[in-house]
C-alpha cells in the first residue's frame, strides 16, 4: 500500500556527554556534539549489523557475503558505463532465490553481454538504455506543468530494475497524472513509463541531531546531517525545508548552537547550519547510533542501487534500508523537489535533515521526506516504506562546503548523454552530464569554441551550433581538490527537428 509523501520535521535534542552521542540521522550533530572522545566503535558495529538483520533480513551468516558484494560494486559501477558503452542500462545489487547477493548490470543490446561478464557481474538484457530513461526523467523535469502541485503527480524516478521511469500519482488522481505525463512526453515517451497510484502524499520530515536533534527559532526540530567546513567556518549539513536563512538553532537543553547560513527549498532540499558556539559544538568525524556507539565518516562514495544504507534520526533512531533509485522527484504539495534518492528506509517526523550512511561509512545524504500513512508520524510500521534523501554531493557543492573527514573522494560522472537527442537537431546540439562531488568542483567543457554551458549543482549541460554532416567532438571534465572525472563523445551534427 502506498501513502502520502511528506517532509519530516518535528521539535527537540538531548544534551550530549562524553561517551554518549546519539547516532542521529544527521552525522553532523554527532560530529558536532560536545563529547571529547568518540563512543565505543564495536557497539556501533554490533548495532548496525543488528539493524541490517531487523530491517533487511541480512543475518550474521549472510553479512560477510553482502559486504564483499558491496565492495565489488564500487569497482563495477565505475567500470561498467565505459565497458558497455551506449547500451548501458544501469547497475544494482540484487538477491537471487538462493539468497546470494550479486552485482547486476543491465544492457540494451545482447552484444554487450560478454563485456559485462568480464567485469564479474551478472547481466540482464532490457529494452531501454539508461540514457533513454534519464532523458524521459529530464523531459518531465523541464516541463513547467510538472511544477504545478495540482498536476496529479506525487513523484517520479528511474527504476533500473524494471527498466522504466516510475511515475506515482496522488490518491484518486491516476488519470490526471497520466494525462500530465503524456502531455510532457507524448505517446512514444510514455512507453518508457510505468504509472502507480499512491495512497498518500509526500511530506517533509522536520525535527535536529546528526543523527541527533536540534531545535530551531521557528519552533521546529530536525536532525543533524553531516559535519562540514567552509574555510574557517564549521557547521553541519541538513534539509532546506527545516529552516530559512537566518533561522537560529540550539540543542535540546537550550544551548545556543548556530544559524542557517544557506538554505534552498523547494526544487532542491539543501541547507547548512554554521556553528556560532564552537566551544560547545566541536566537529567530530562520526555519527551517533543512539546506543552509545558511533560510525566513522569515511567518505562520499555513492552506494549503488540495491545497496544497504542506514539512517540515524532523533525521531525513529537508527534504521537500515536499500537504495531504490536515483534522480527521483517528490511533490510535497508545498513544492516539487528534484534530484532525490528514493530508498526503502523508514523515517518519521523529526528525522528530516538526518544522516544516511553505508555500513562501510560512506556518507550518502540527508533525509528530505517520506510517504507516510494518513495521520501517522512515521512509516516504520509499513511493509514497504519509502523515504527520499537529498544527496550530499550537490548540497556540498551548492554552498562551497567540504565534508569533515580525512578521506575525501574525487568526483564521479554518474550519467553522460551526448548528444541529448531531445534537445538537439536543426543544426544545434546539446549534451548533459550528471555528476557527484563531495567537495566544491570545477566544470570544463572542451572541444568546441562556440556554445554555452550551464546547469546547477550535480547537473551540467552544453549546447551550440553545428553544420550539416559536421563531426562534433566534445569533452566534459569535473574536477575537485582530490581528482577529476572526464567523459567525451564524438557524433555527427544532429539533423532532425528539435523537440
Image: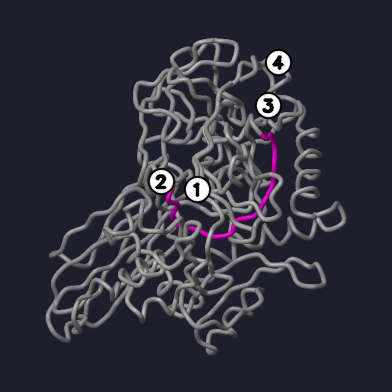
In this orientation, does residue 202 appear?
yes
495 vs 215: above or below: below
Quadrant location of the N terminus in the rendered image: bottom right
- Residue of label 4: 18
Residue 6 on image: x %, y %: 51, 43
Q: Nearer the viewer, residue 78 or 2?
A: 2
- Residue of label 3: 22
- The earlier-in-sequence mark between 1 and 2 is 1
Magenta stretch?
A: 316-331
As measured in the structure, the alpha-carbon distance from the residue carrying label 3 to the one carrying label 1 is: 27 Å
Q: Are marks 1 and 2 in contact (CB under 8 Å)?
A: yes
Q: Residue at x 38, y 45 (%)?
A: 268
Residue 95 on image: x %, y %: 73, 67
Q: Nearer the viewer, mark 3 or mark 2?
A: 2
Q: Residue at x 53, y 84 (%)?
A: 112
Q: Nearer the viewer, mark 4 or mark 2?
A: 2
Q: How would you classify the magenta stretch by its main secondary structure?
A: strand
Q: Nearer the viewer, residue 398 or 448?
A: 398
Q: Nearer the viewer, mark 3 or mark 1?
A: 1
- Residue of label 1: 202
Secondary structure under badge 1?
loop
Residue 488 on image: x %, y %: 34, 69
Q: Nearer the viewer, mark 3 or mark 4?
A: 3
The numbered mark at residue 333 is 2
Amino acid at each position: 500500500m502506498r501513502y502520502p509523501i511528506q517532509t519530516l520535521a518535528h521539535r527537540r535534542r538531548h544534551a550530549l556527554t562524553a561517551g554518549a552521542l546519539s547516532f542521529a540521522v544527521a552525522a553532523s550533530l554527532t560530529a558536532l556534539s560536545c563529547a571529547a572522545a568518540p563512543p565505543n566503535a564495536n557497539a556501533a558495529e554490533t548495532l548496525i549489523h543488528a539493524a541490517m538483520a531487523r530491517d533487511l533480513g541480512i543475518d550474521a551468516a549472510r553479512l560477510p557475503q553482502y559486504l564483499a558484494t558491496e565492495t565489488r560494486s564500487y569497482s563495477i559501477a565505475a567500470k561498467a558505463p565505459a565497458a558497455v558503452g551506449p547500451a548501458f542500462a544501469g547497475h544494482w545489487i540484487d538477491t537471487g532465490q538462493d539468497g546470494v547477493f550479486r552485482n547486476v548490470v543491465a544492457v540494451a543490446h545482447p552484444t554487450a553481454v560478454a563485456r559485462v561478464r568480464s567485469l564479474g557481474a551478472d547481466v540482464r538484457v532490457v529494452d531501454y538504455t539508461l540514457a533513454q530513461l534519464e532523458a524521459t526523467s529530464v523531459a518531465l523535469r523541464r516541463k513547467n506543468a510538472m511544477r504545478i502541485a495540482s498536476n496529479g503527480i506525487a513523484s517520479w524516478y528511474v527504476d533500473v530494475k524494471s527498466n522504466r521511469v516510475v511515475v506515482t500519482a496522488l490518491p484518486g488522481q491516476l488519470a490526471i497524472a497520466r494525462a500530465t505525463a503524456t502531455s510532457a512526453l507524448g505517446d512514444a515517451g510514455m512507453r518508457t513509463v510505468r504509472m502507480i497510484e499512491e495512497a498518500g502524499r509526500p511530506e517533509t520530515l522536520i525535527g535536529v541531531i546528526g543523527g541527533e536533534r536540534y531545535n530551531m527559532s521557528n519552533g521546529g526540530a530536525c536532525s543533524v546531517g553531516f559535519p562540514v567546513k567552509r574555510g574557517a567556518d564549521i557547521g553541519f549539513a541538513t534539509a532546506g525545508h527545516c529552516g530559512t536563512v537566518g533561522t537560529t538553532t540550539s540543542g535540546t537543553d537550550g544551548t545556543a548552537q548556530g544559524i542557517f547560513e544557506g538554505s534552498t527549498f523547494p526544487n532542491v532540499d539543501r541547507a547548512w547550519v554554521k556553528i556560532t558556539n564552537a566551544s560547545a559544538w566541536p566537529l567530530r568525524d562520526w555519527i551517533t547510533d543512539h546506543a552509545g556507539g558511533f560510525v566513522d565518516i569515511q567518505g562520499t562514495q555513492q552506494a549503488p542501487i540495491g545497496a544497504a544504507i542506514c539512517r540515524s534520526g532523533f525521531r525513529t533512531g537508527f534504521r537500515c534500508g536499500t537504495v531504490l533509485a536515483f534522480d527521483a522527484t517528490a511533490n510535497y504539495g508545498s513544492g516539487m523537489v528534484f534530484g532525490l534518492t528514493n530508498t526503502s528506509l523508514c523515517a518519521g517526523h523529526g528525522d528530516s535533515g538526518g544522516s544516511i550512511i553505508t555500513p562501510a561509512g560512506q556518507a550518502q545524504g540527508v533525509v528530505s521526506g517520506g510517504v507516510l500513512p494518513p495521520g501517522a508520524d512515521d512509516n516504520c510500521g509499513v511493509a514497504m516504506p519509502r523515504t527520499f534523501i537529498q544527496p550530499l554531493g550537490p548540497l556540498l557543492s551548492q554552498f562551497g562546503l567540504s565534508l569533515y573527514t580525512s578521506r575525501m573522494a574525487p568526483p564521479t560522472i554518474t550519467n553522460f548523454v551526448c548528444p541529448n537527442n531531445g534537445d538537439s537537431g536543426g543544426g544545434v546540439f546539446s549534451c548533459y552530464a550528471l555528476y557527484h562531488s563531495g567537495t566544491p568542483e570545477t566544470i570544463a567543457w572542451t572541444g568546441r569554441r562556440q556554445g554555452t554551458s550551464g546547469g546547477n549543482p550535480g547537473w551540467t549541460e552544453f549546447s551550440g551550433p553545428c553544420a550539416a554532416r559536421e563531426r562534433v567532438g566534445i569533452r566534459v571534465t569535473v574536477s575537485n581538490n582530490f581528482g577529476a572525472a572526464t567523459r567525451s563523445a564524438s557524433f555527427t551534427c544532429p539533423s532532425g527537428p528539435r523537440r
